[in-house]
Image: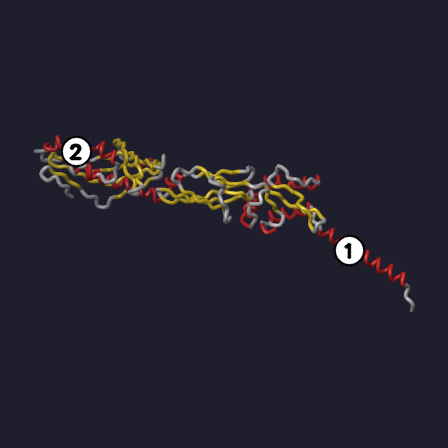
């Protein structure tokens, strides 16, 4: 059978055309469309799949990390803030409808970013990056900051500004070191809507609420209260006040001189510190010029009695008072010192109105004694 060569050529051309059409259709179907990028974004957010965003997210600052941690922060924010999410989706849909693929004023914009396969426009979501500024630290505070699970994020120059990073919801962990110790605080921070967001460290609050600092302050108060019994029954020897500032010692030195003038009329003195109740709601910790100070009040109780010379009975001088202590921290001695004291007579029930309080108990409180005939302190 003789084959017509013209027919063979025509058939080959037709087959090539069909194959070419199939290729073109297939490529056209695989070509990216702006609507695909928007749909991929919405699915990733709704299904919380950060890996689906890695190829389509483009930060306006290329230094911003685009990884699971930063994309998770972005997704979490949008899931937690439905109004913001709706605004972004509406804006992206409007860009698709208007075929306007340039950056908008929104946090996320649909842009045309080069060519795919060198032929078709490629579409990305450009995000406006942000930075986090940490403020509020005192002179003498050394601050270390970590943001979520982002690693290698450095602060900018000499300022405590961290970024750039993708917008989103981040857990900012701040570690503060100073003379009082090491404190940690974590704050959930929404980096959205502004180029820079601020996180404030309150070192005073961290110190005030720290259990170790409270314990040290209460120990200083307790030592002073005990020393007051020793002070009285030593003939008011200023050296028995073991945790007061030099200024307090200077201001109190006259008491011993005054006692020397009247001690010949006194036969015996007793003092017994029974304990105290500290008002923790009244506790305050502050710093100025790298010096730490604190204030706290307490209801204190003492048994006290005195016998005058040639008298057979003791006069009961037992009392309760509300003491307002001012303390200073000595960084060299690493302890709190009493810097000032205000005292007023108590009715004994003041602590009933205190919601947050701590009792300083004294087990088997000793009775300290001073005697004119034996001026040493006796138990």
Q: Quadrant of the N terminus?
A: bottom right
Q: Secondary structure at mark 2?
A: helix
Residue 371 located left or right of residue 18: left
The residue wearing badge 2 is 256
> In the rendering, at what x and y percent does residue 20 appear?
79, 55
Please tell me which of labels 2 and 1 falls first in the chain.
Answer: 1
> In the rendering, at what x and y percent does residue 102 appear?
66, 40
When asked about the image quadrant of residue 250, the answer is: top left
Q: Quadrant of the C terminus?
A: top left
Toward the left, the furthest residue is 310
* Tally of numbered tags: 2
Label pair 2/1, CB-CB below 8 angstroms: no
> In the rendering, at what x and y percent does residue 121 appear?
70, 46
Q: Is residue 299 above or below residue 10?
A: above
Q: Is residue 111 visible?
A: yes
Q: Is residue 286 visible?
A: no
The residue wearing badge 1 is 22
């Amino acid at each position: 059978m003789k084959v017509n060569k013209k027919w063979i050529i025509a058939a080959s051309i037709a087959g090539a055309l069909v194959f070419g059409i199939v290729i073109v259709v297939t490529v056209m179907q695989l070509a990216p469309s702006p609507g695909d990028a928007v749909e991929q974004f919405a699915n990733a957010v709704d299904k919380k799949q950060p890996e689906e965003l890695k190829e389509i997210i483009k930060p306006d600052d290329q230094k911003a990390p685009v990884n699971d941690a930063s994309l998770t922060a972005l997704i979490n924010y949008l899931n937690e803030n439905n109004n913001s999410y709706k605004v972004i989706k509406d804006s992206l849909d409007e860009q698709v409808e208007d075929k306007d693929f340039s950056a908008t004023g929104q946090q996320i914009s649909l842009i045309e970013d080069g060519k795919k396969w060198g032929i078709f426009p490629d579409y990305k979501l450009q995000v406006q990056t942000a930075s986090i500024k940490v403020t509020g630290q005192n002179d003498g505070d050394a601050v270390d900051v970590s943001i979520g699970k982002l690693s290698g994020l450095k602060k900018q120059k000499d300022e405590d500004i961290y970024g750039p990073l993708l917008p989103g919801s981040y857990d900012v962990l701040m570690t503060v070191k100073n003379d009082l110790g090491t404190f940690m605080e974590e704050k959930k921070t929404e980096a959205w809507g502004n180029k820079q967001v601020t996180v404030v460290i309150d070192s005073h609050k961290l110190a005030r609420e720290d259990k170790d600092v409270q314990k040290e302050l209460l120990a200083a108060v307790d030592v002073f209260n005990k020393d007051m019994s020793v002070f009285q029954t030593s003939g008011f020897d200023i050296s028995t006040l073991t945790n007061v500032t030099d200024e307090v010692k200077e201001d109190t030195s006259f008491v011993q001189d005054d006692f020397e003038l009247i001690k010949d009329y006194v036969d015996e003195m007793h003092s017994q510190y029974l304990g105290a109740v500290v008002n923790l709601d009244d506790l305050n910790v502050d710093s100025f010029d790298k010096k730490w100070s604190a204030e706290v009040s307490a209801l204190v109780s003492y048994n006290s009695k005195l016998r005058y010379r040639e008298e057979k009975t003791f006069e009961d001088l037992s009392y309760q008072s509300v003491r307002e202590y001012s303390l200073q921290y000595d960084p060299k001695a690493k302890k709190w010192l009493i810097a000032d004291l205000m005292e007023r007579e108590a009715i004994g029930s003041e602590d009933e109105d205190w919601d947050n309080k701590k009792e300083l108990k004294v087990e088997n409180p000793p009775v300290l004694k001073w005697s004119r005939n034996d001026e040493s302190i006796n138990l």
